[in-house]
Image: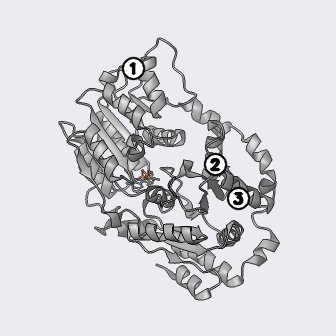
């Protein structure tokens, strides 16, 4: 896989950059735009970012001692009885103590006989490390064939998970990993010798059935990341289910997600019988470290102005802006680029190389703002994202609130206990109805943000 990652890091986004080259070469905010923000707005927005969003290790330690926090832990990684080389890898990654999901799930996942698990934990609370440690613990490097399959819904997430696997297993050089994603090929007639396959469902299914590159009967562990979408009829149900049917009855199932609907939970239970279930209460699903706001707007131009104000005031961190359609994302990015803002666009129709390159640039901070559609709402872990803006609220095909997408989108900020801000730009009655329902559903207030009102802004800036 090294080759893939390297190529993508090296890849240049010529086609995209040529579209937005103005944004690249100009400063982030022009002088005229600076004037659009009143001095009080600017200083307050900066204060929010400075005081609210920079979390020290000390804050995380405090959260760890609060039993209500998803970072709460009473155990150490030593107590989880990991292999010493895995433990070394964990510490090398800078993890001092397990999060709640890690300390709860790992003893279950490592127990013998193996136990199926369907686990829910909030965005950014360390689910990946939980299942990666379990996967690595189950591999027997003596045998040169795949023993673990981990499925993710998108290419980007697969690569991200693979990178966590590679880092955690740095002191287990005998454990080998194979990516099953678009662009990866195996020589016809040969067999895969790596122990872990991490991939997207279509490719893994092809490798197992059409090309018979590995024997599914040797698989001991089957992991579904973002499990709800992997077993949902709207998602990858068919392929995941077909892969599951190839695996031995005894194969251990590990399903992880931040969200599950009742239906999905029932179905997951059917394909992973007698699972232990770790489920959050509704009011626990959203994180207290992510403050949620809405801004009243009249139309999309008005939303754009609100955005520019927020963008202009933010001096630290990065923002992700979600649009419901590619058309809206393109309109927005053109507006922003015209006015000299350095923004990047990531939407579904880009090639894989382009998508990875956009993400790499954003991760490196080359662009402060990433405009995207729902393609990036799940799983992507970029620590420095301090603000998520819903330029459009997430809605279903029937234009009702899409609760799960909302939760996944705002979860791109506030990673592992850091502070984050989610701002919803709402215009029109329908938007207000959707917002109200979202607020009621998660039992968490979404406060009105009135950028013209100094008191409002002061309140916002003063928060813990
Ligand atoms: N025990 C730990 N100590 C410190 N940092 C951790 C620990 N576990 C995970 N992290 C970090 O927390 C961040 C979020 O973790 P991760 O991506 O696994 O979250 P997640 O629960 O899978 O989120 P999502 O639902 O969005 O997929 C990552 O940057 C990861 O490196």
Q: Which residue is mark 3?
A: 332
Locate residue 148, reporting x and y percent. Answer: 35, 31
Q: Tell me the CA gap for discs 2 and 1.
A: 34 Å
Q: Quadrant of residue 350?
A: top right
Which residue appears farthest toward the top when viewing the image?
189
Q: Does residue 262 appear left or right of residue 458 in this picture? A: left
The answer to whether 446 is drawn above or below residue 403 in the figure is below
The answer to whether 153 is drawn above or below residue 336 in the figure is above
Helix or strand or loop: what does disc 1 sit on? loop
Q: Does residue 53 appear left or right of residue 228 in this picture? A: right
Does residue 336 appear in the picture of this structure? yes
Q: Which mark is residue 214?
A: 1
Helix or strand or loop: what does disc 2 sit on? strand
Which of the two discs, 2 and 1, labels the residue nearer the N terminus? 1
Which of the two discs, 2 and 3, labels the residue nearer the N terminus? 3
Locate residue 457, reporting x and y percent. Answer: 58, 82
Does residue 193 appear in the picture of this structure? no
The answer to whether 103 is drawn above or below residue 422 in the figure is above
Locate residue 414, reporting x and y percent. Answer: 48, 63
Q: Does residue 80 appear left or right of residue 203 in this picture? A: left
Q: Residues within 10 Å of mark 1 (few under 14, many from 20)?
A: many
Q: Which residue is mark 2?
A: 346
Which residue does the image show at 65% across and 59% down from the upper left? 369
Helix or strand or loop: what does disc 3 sit on? helix
Q: Tell me the CA gap for discs 2 and 3.
A: 12 Å
Q: Residues within 10 Å of mark 3 (few under 14, many from 20)?
A: many
Q: Is mark 3 within 8 Å of ligand 1?
A: no
Which residue does the image show at 55% across and 26% down from the upper left? 184
Q: Nearer the viewer, mark 2 or mark 1?
A: 2
């Amino acid at each position: 896989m090294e080759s893939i990652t390297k190529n993508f890091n090296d890849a240049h986004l010529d086609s995209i950059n040529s579209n937005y080259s103005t944004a690249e070469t100009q400063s982030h905010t022009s002088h005229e735009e600076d004037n659009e923000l009143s001095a009080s707005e600017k200083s307050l927005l900066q204060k929010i970012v400075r005081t609210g969003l920079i979390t020290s290790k000390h804050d995380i330690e405090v959260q760890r001692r609060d039993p209500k926090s998803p970072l709460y832990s009473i155990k150490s990684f030593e107590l989880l009885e990991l292999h010493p080389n895995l433990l070394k890898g964990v510490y090398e990654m800078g993890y001092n103590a397990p999060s709640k999901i890690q300390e709860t799930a790992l003893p279950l996942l490592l127990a013998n006989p193996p136990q199926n698990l369907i686990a829910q934990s909030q965005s950014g609370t360390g689910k990946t490390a939980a299942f990666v440690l379990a996967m690595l613990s189950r591999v027997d490097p003596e045998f040169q064939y795949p023993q673990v399959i981990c499925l993710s819904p998108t290419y980007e997430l697969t690569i991200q998970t693979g990178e966590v696997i590679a880092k955690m297993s740095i002191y287990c050089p005998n454990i080998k990993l194979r990516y099953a994603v678009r662009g990866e090929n195996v020589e016809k007639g040969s067999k895969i010798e790596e122990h872990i396959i991490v991939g997207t469902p279509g490719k893994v299914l092809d490798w197992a059935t059409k090309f018979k590159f590995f024997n599914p009967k040797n698989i001991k562990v089957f992991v579904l990341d973002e499990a709800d979408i992997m077993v949902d009829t709207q998602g990858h149900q068919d392929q995941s289910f077909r892969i599951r049917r190839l695996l031995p009855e005894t194969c251990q199932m590990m399903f992880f997600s931040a969200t599950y609907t009742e239906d999905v939970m029932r179905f997951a239970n059917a394909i992973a019988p007698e699972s232990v279930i770790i489920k959050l209460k509704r009011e626990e699903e959203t994180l207290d470290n992510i403050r949620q706001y809405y801004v009243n707007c009249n139309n999309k131009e008005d939303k754009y102005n609100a955005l520019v104000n927020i963008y202009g005031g933010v001096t630290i961190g990065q923002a992700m802006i979600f649009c419901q359609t590619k058309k809206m994302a393109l309109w927005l990015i053109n507006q922003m680029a015209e006015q000299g803002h350095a923004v990047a666009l990531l939407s579904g129709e880009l090639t894989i190389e382009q998508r990875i390159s956009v993400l790499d640039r954003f991760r490196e901070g080359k662009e402060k703002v990433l405009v995207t559609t729902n393609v990036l709402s799940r799983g992507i872990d970029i620590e420095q994202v301090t603000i998520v803006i819903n330029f459009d609220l997430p809605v279903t095909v029937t234009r009702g609130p899409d609760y799960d997408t909302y939760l996944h989108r705002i979860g791109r900020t506030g990673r592992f206990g850091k502070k984050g801000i989610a701002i919803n730009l709402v215009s029109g009655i329908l938007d207000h109805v959707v917002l109200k329902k979202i607020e009621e559903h998660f039992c968490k207030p979404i406060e009105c943000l009135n950028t013209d009102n100094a008191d409002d802004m002061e309140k916002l800036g003063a928060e813990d």
